[in-house]
Image (cartoon, grey):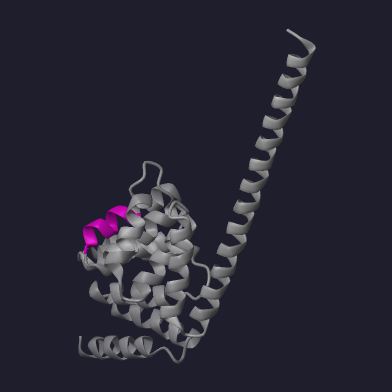
C-alpha cells in the first residue's frame, strides 16, 4: 500500500469519526430540547389545571403525549385528564397498551382500572386494580379502586377489606375514602360505625356536601332501625 493511499484512508476514517460525533451531538441536543419542551408543556398544563382551564390542560397534555406516545408518564397524565374531562373511552385507548403490557406498572394498571370503573365495567376494574396491587401492594389508590369495583359488584365484605387497606396506607386527603368506607359499612347494616366515620370526615372537611348528605341519610336510617 502506498503512503498516499494510507494517508487517504486515515483521512477518510477521521472524517467518518467526526461525522459520527457530530451526529451524536445533534441527537443529544435534540433529546435535551425535547425534554425541556415537554417539561414546559407539563408546567403549562398543571398551571391551566389549577386555574380551572381543564380543556386547555388536556390540550397541552395531549401535545406532550403526541411528542412521545411511548412515554408512560406522559400517557398516564393525559389519560387521567381525559377521564376527568369526561372522555373515559379515549382515556382507555391511551392507557391500554401500557396496562396490558407483560410487566405493566402499578400506575398504568391502576389508572386503567379507574377508567374501566368510569366506563361501568366493574369486572375489568377489579382485574386491573388487582394487577396494580400485584405490582405494588402498597399502592393505596389501587386498593381504593379495588374497593369501589367490589362494592359496585355487591361484594361488600371484600370491598371493606380493600377500603381499610387503602385507608391504612393513604397519603393526603382521606375524606373520599372515609366516605366510601362509611357507605360500604352502611350497605352491610353497620350504621353506627358508618356514622362515626362520617362524623370524623366532617370534622376534617366540614364543607363537603356529600359527607353531610350521607351522614344525614345514614343517621335517619339508623334511627328508624
The residue sitting at the top extreme is 1
Q: Is residue 103 left or right of residue 155?
A: right
Q: Is residue 155 left or right of residue 35?
A: left
Q: Is residue 8 visible?
A: yes
Residue 19 is situated, as x and y percent measured from the top left of the image, at 67, 36
Quadrant location of the C terminus in the rendered image: bottom left
- Say which residue appears at 23% left-offset and 87% top-offset: 221
Picture residue at 77% right of the left edge, 15% below the top: 4
Task: Tell me: residue 108, above or below residue 103.
Answer: below
Dominant secondary-structure state across the stretch colored magenta: helix
Based on the displayed image, in which of its 4 quarters is residue 140 positioned?
bottom left
Specify the quadrant that holds the N terminus: top right
Looking at the picture, how far across and down is residue 41, in whole percent? 54, 69
Task: Give the residue displayed 68% in from the left and 42% down from the top.
Answer: 22
**First to last magenta residue range:** 121-129
Front one among 18 and 174:
18
| Corner quadrant of residue 152 | bottom left
* Residue at the image position 65 percent from the left and 52 percent from the top: 29
Asked if 15 appears above or below 180 in the picture, the reply is above
- Which residue occupies the foreground of this view, 120 or 172? 120
Q: Quadrant of residue 3?
A: top right
Q: Is residue 67 above or below residue 184?
A: above
Q: Is residue 7 magenta?
A: no
Q: Nearer the viewer, residue 197 or 140?
A: 140
Left or right: residue 140 compared with residue 33: left
Q: Nearer the viewer, residue 112 or 126?
A: 112
Give the percent coordinates (x, y) of residue 80.
Answer: 40, 67
Amino acid at each position: 500500500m502506498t503512503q498516499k493511499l494510507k494517508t487517504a484512508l486515515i483521512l477518510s476514517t477521521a472524517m467518518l469519526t467526526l461525522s459520527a460525533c457530530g451526529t451524536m451531538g445533534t441527537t443529544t441536543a435534540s433529546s435535551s430540547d425535547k425534554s425541556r419542551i415537554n417539561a414546559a408543556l407539563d408546567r403549562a398544563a398543571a398551571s391551566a389545571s389549577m386555574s380551572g382551564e381543564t380543556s386547555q390542560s388536556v390540550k397541552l397534555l395531549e401535545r406532550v403525549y403526541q411528542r412521545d406516545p411511548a412515554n408512560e408518564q406522559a400517557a398516564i397524565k393525559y389519560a387521567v385528564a381525559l377521564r376527568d374531562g369526561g372522555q373515559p373511552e379515549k382515556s382507555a385507548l391511551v392507557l391500554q397498551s401500557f396496562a396490558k403490557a407483560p410487566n405493566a406498572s402499578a400506575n398504568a394498571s391502576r389508572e386503567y382500572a379507574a377508567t374501566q370503573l368510569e366506563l361501568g365495567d366493574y369486572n375489568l376494574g377489579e382485574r386491573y386494580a388487582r394487577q396494580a396491587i400485584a405490582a405494588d401492594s402498597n399502592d393505596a389508590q389501587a386498593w381504593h379502586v379495588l374497593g369501589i369495583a367490589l362494592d359496585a359488584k355487591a361484594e361488600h365484605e371484600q370491598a371493606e377489606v380493600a377500603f381499610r387497606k387503602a385507608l391504612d396506607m393513604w397519603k393526603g386527603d382521606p375524606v373520599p375514602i372515609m366516605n366510601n368506607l362509611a357507605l360500604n359499612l352502611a350497605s352491610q347494616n353497620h350504621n353506627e360505625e358508618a356514622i362515626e366515620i362520617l362524623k370524623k370526615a366532617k370534622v376534617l372537611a366540614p364543607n363537603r356536601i356529600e359527607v353531610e348528605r350521607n351522614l344525614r341519610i345514614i343517621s335517619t336510617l339508623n334511627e328508624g332501625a
